[in-house]
Amino acid sequence: MHGQALKGHLDLLLLATLEHEPAHGYAVIDALSFRTDGELDLPEGTVYPALHRLESAGLLSSSWSDSAPRRRRVYRLTRKGRAALRRERQTWQAFSRAITAVVGPGPA
Amino acid sequence: VTIARYLRELHAALVVDPWTRRRVLAETEDHLRSAVEAGASESEAVARFGSPSALAARFAEVYAARVTRGTAWLLLGLLVVAFMTLYPIPENTLPPAPWPEDSPPGHLMWKRDLAVVLFAVAAVLGIAAALLRQSVRTSLALTGGALVVLAATTLEGAVLAWQWHEAVPGAPGPRWIVPAAVAQAALIACVAGIAASAFRARLAATNEEAP
């Protein structure tokens, strides 16, 4: 999917990916690709700075995990992040409904 | 490009503090090694990250925003310290000054008023930098302005305190004025140094056109 189309939705995607369990950056990108059948194959150079930005904003927290062969930075949602996810999700759903109402399913 | 070379170039391009640099490099290396373990070649894994300078610019943008916010809050703390050092200088905490006809010398009064005005300007700029939502560039400009005015306040306040000491028996003397002025100047320099690192990061983020 074109990167421009994702602009503005990256935060929502990352927060939603981390909603149910903490994950490191590689797993986040992998999950996004897997859950969308490869449609959302985000470049790492975009995802990692975004994870850092969300952490700076207090929406994520992170810590080192030593369980893997190498040290890994594991990200998890904070309470503020969950609240932001709820808001962003509602906004997205309203936006999505509005666009679908106009665009429609297309000719059969 | 091998992973080792990519990490070397990224290390050189990053304009962040040493802790963030170590973290970014460790995360990047872990990701690249994981990708190789999953079957990608080193050059394929590296290509997905984009050029080291573009990646560094994105981190610089995040870092600049974070450090700018932190600097603005440090500045507020500095203003409190400056207020505490300025406060004893005027008559507030001194015994009644023996001015002839209860009228303090004019050269002390206008300097005191100037110190108060300068401090007020620095405070307004500092509070605006910390509390208003604005771009990194605006916040850094406000912070820089506040620091310059605060430095002027410190210098002018030190001169005033010295002259006050000469005019008012019992007023704090060099033993108090010099350490206070030096400590305040050192704190201003520290905060200015942190603000400068945010500025450098902002510059690095702006100069590099991320893909």
Image: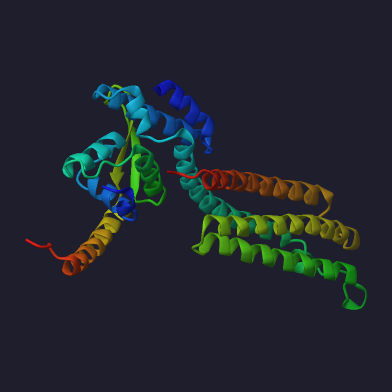
- Name, please, the residue furthest toward the front: A107
| Residue A43, percent from left and from top | 33, 39
Q: Quadrant of the C terminus of chain A?
A: bottom left
Name the image quarter holding residue B91.
bottom right
- Name, please, the residue furthest toward the bottom: B101
| Residue B58, percent from left and from top | 45, 43
Count of numbered labels shown in the rendering: 0
The residue sitting at 71% across, 56% down in the picture is: B148
| Residue B108, percent from left and from top | 86, 67
Horizontal relation, residue B17 to residue B173: left or right: left
Of residues A97 and B122, the one drawn nearer to the viewer in this rendering: A97
Q: Is residue B160 visible?
A: yes
The residue sitting at 37% across, 43% down in the picture is: A46
Horizontal relation, residue B12 to residue A101: left or right: right
| Residue A92, percent from left and from top | 24, 61
Horizontal relation, residue A12 to residue B18: left or right: left
Of residues B137 and B70, the one drawn nearer to the viewer in this rendering: B137
Name the image quarter holding residue A36.
top left
Q: Is residue B171 visible?
A: no
Name the image quarter holding residue B73.
bottom right
The residue sitting at 83% across, 66% down in the picture is: B111
* B27 lies above or below B181: above
Of residues A38 and B90, the one drawn nearer to the viewer in this rendering: A38
- Name, please, the residue furthest toward the right: B100
Of residues B81 and B174, the one drawn nearer to the viewer in this rendering: B81
